[in-house]
């Protein structure tokens, strides 16, 4: 049973920074990638960034240059460093894990609120 636990969310002023963490536990075989998604109130969940098992990263256009995803494969951790936060970044941020032949795993989410 794979579990993902996010932490690091909170309230920050516009222009500030936060660092989200996601810890994965359980047996993970065929890890493909880990990712962050977010869902603002009243909106659909959207992709933010991912990092593959080989270290390749990809970002949504809205966060490029401001957010950085990184990971520690041995410790099964993934981070999202968020700089220059804006009110439109306010959302619940979810950790996602994709492994071959398995449905995606999701964390419970962590709230990020950016005040103007």
Image (cartoon, grey):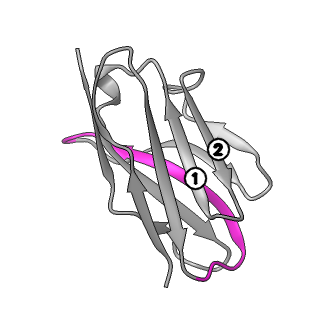
| Tag 2 secondary structure | strand
Farthest left residue in view: 42
Count of labels in the image: 2
Magenta residues span 27-42
Residue 30 located within the stretch drawn in magenta: yes
Q: Are marks 1 and 2 in contact (CB under 8 Å)?
A: yes
Q: Which residue is mark 1?
A: 78
Quarter location, residue 20: top left
Q: Which residue is mark 2?
A: 70
- Picture layout, residue 26 above or below residue 115: below
Does 56 sit left or right of 94 as displayed?
A: right
Mark 1 burial class by Cα count in 10 Å: few <14, some 14-19, many 20+: many
Residue at 35 percent across and 29 percent down: it is 89
Q: Nearer the viewer, residue 40 or 6?
A: 6
Does 66 sit left or right of 54 as displayed?
A: left
Q: Quadrant of the C terminus?
A: top left
Quarter location, residue 64: top right
- Picture layout, residue 5 above or below residue 16: below
Residue 84 located within the stretch drawn in magenta: no
Q: Alpha-carbon distance for marks 1 and 2? A: 6 Å
Q: Position of residue 36 (x, y in %)?
A: 49, 48
Q: Position of residue 63 (x, y in %)?
A: 51, 27
Does 5 sit left or right of 10 as displayed?
A: right
| Tag 1 secondary structure | strand
- Picture layout, residue 116 above or below residue 35: above
Residue at 72 percent across and 75 percent down: it is 30
Q: Earlier in the sequence, mark 1 or mark 2?
A: 2
Q: Position of residue 53 (x, y in %)?
A: 74, 59
Q: Nearer the viewer, residue 96 or 42?
A: 96
């Amino acid at each position: 049973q794979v579990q993902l636990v996010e932490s690091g969310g909170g309230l920050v002023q516009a222009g500030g920074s936060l660092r989200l963490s996601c810890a994965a536990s359980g047996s993970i075989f065929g890890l493909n990638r880990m990712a962050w998604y977010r869902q603002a109130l009243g909106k659909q969940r959207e992709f933010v960034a991912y990092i593959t098992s080989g270290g390749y990263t990809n970002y949504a256009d809205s966060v490029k240059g401001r957010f950085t995803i990184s990971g520690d494969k041995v410790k099964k951790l993934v981070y999202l460093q968020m700089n220059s936060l804006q009110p439109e970044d306010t959302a619940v941020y979810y950790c996602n894990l994709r492994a071959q032949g398995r449905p995606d795993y999701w964390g419970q989410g962590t709230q990020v609120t950016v005040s103007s």
